[in-house]
Image (tube, rainbow, N blue to C red):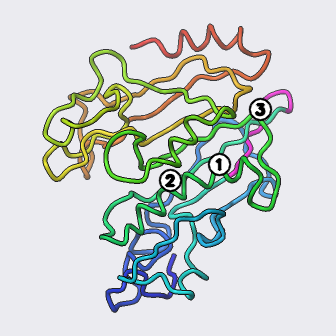
């Protein structure tokens, strides 16, 4: 979506870096939610994508003069590079499970101003502010699942780690810590992975391992409201001999979790044990 401004300071308008989120046209790099359960009516869906970055409490707005983050830019630039959605799924028995989902900008490709790094941090910090009730409307009622591509690892790679670490440590949330099965963890090969501190079996993104690459990182998350029961979780990587698509093999694993709501725990535990067994 165009901003109509020269956000990157290259003297041109309408380039991919001048959009609300990087992309050559409206809808490029968008996200979608697919659900086997019915989703709540449109009136119950909350799209937080219109929140201005400058209106987030405690926002780490760019301060560098090159390029400057001007007053007209602050009046237009949204926080969400793709979206922050609050979407209730309708479950049997009249219950609801709210999906809180987002896809953040990578914290790189921006130069000394660290505009993407700051925005990436704040896209994760948004959820803490929402749960705190600091955004002008009530926080989501449990049960809910916070899931998405944060594009930030809590230990390794580039970026400002504070916001994602705060979410992982928040007592209102349960980190499901999906991990690859033995033999399918990403090997910590190459110079990019040598200094990494995180558990490689938790890495969800298979990035370049050379000197210029970020290496393998944990960037994708499924966090549960504390009232939910975490039964099982994991990462599903394509088989090594799977045919690659036009853009090569997928860079991200499928991150999955089996959960139970309230009294469903005992019944769902058996289902989870069967559904998550390696095949």
Count residues near mark 3 (Cα–Cα under 10 Å), then give few for <14, some for 14-19, many for 20+. some
Residue at the image position 55 percent from the left and 76 percent from the top = 77
Query: For this view, does 241 lie left or right of residue 81?
Result: left
Q: Is residue 157 above or below residue 105?
A: above
* x and y percentages locating residue 251 in the rendered image: 31, 43
For the residue pair 77 and 59, the one nearer the viewer reads as 59
Pick the residue in front: 22 or 69: 69
Tell me the residue at 34%/31% (across/down): 198
Q: CA distance from mark 1 to mark 3?
A: 26 Å
Residue furthest right as drawn: 94
Per the image, label 3 sits on a secondary structure element best described as: loop
Q: Quadrant of the C terminus?
A: top left
Q: Which one is in front in this view, the residue at disc 1 or the one at disc 3?
A: 1
**Taking 253 as reference, is 175 left or right?**
right
Q: Report the side of 212 relative to 15 (left or right).
A: left
Quickly name the residue at label 2.
103
**Label annotation for residue 91:** 3
Magenta residues (range): 86-94
Q: Considering the numbered disc 2 on the image, is that residue within a helix, a strand or a loop?
A: strand
Asked which secondary structure carries label 1, the reply is: helix
C-alpha separation, residue under disc 2 versus residue under disc 3 = 25 Å
**Alpha carbon distance from label 1 to label 2:** 16 Å
Q: Label 1: which residue?
A: 128
- Measured as percent of width and height from the top left, residue 167 is found at 58, 41
């Amino acid at each position: 979506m165009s901003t109509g401004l020269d956000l990157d300071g290259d003297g041109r308008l309408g380039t991919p870096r001048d959009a609300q989120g990087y992309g050559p046209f409206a809808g490029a790099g968008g996200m979608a939610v697919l659900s086997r359960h019915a989703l709540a009516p449109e009136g119950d869906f909350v799209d937080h994508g219109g929140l201005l970055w400058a209106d987030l409490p405690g926002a780490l707005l760019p301060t560098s003069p090159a390029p400057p983050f001007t007053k007209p830019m602050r009046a237009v630039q949204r926080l969400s590079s793709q979206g922050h959605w609050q979407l209730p799924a309708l479950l049997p028995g009249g219950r609801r499970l709210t999906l809180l989902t987002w896809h953040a900008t990578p914290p790189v490709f921006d130069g000394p101003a660290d505009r993407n790094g700051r925005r990436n941090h704040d896209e994760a910090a948004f959820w803490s502010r929402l749960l705190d009730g600091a955004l002008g409307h009530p926080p989501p009622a449990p049960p809910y699942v916070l899931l998405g591509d944060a594009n930030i690892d809590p230990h390794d790679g580039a970026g400002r780690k504070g916001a994602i670490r705060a979410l992982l440590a928040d007592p209102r949330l349960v980190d499901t810590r999906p991990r690859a099965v033995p033999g399918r963890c990403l090997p910590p090969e190459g110079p990019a992975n040598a200094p990494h501190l995180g558990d490689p079996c938790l890495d969800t993104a298979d990035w370049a391992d050379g000197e210029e690459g970020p290496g393998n990182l944990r960037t994708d998350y499924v966090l549960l409201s504390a009232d939910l029961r975490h039964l099982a979780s994991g990462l599903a990587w394509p088989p090594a001999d799977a045919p690659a698509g036009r853009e090569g093999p997928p860079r991200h694993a499928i991150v999955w979790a089996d959960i139970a709501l309230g009294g469903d725990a005992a019944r769902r535990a058996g289902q989870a044990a069967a559904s998550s067994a390696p095949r």
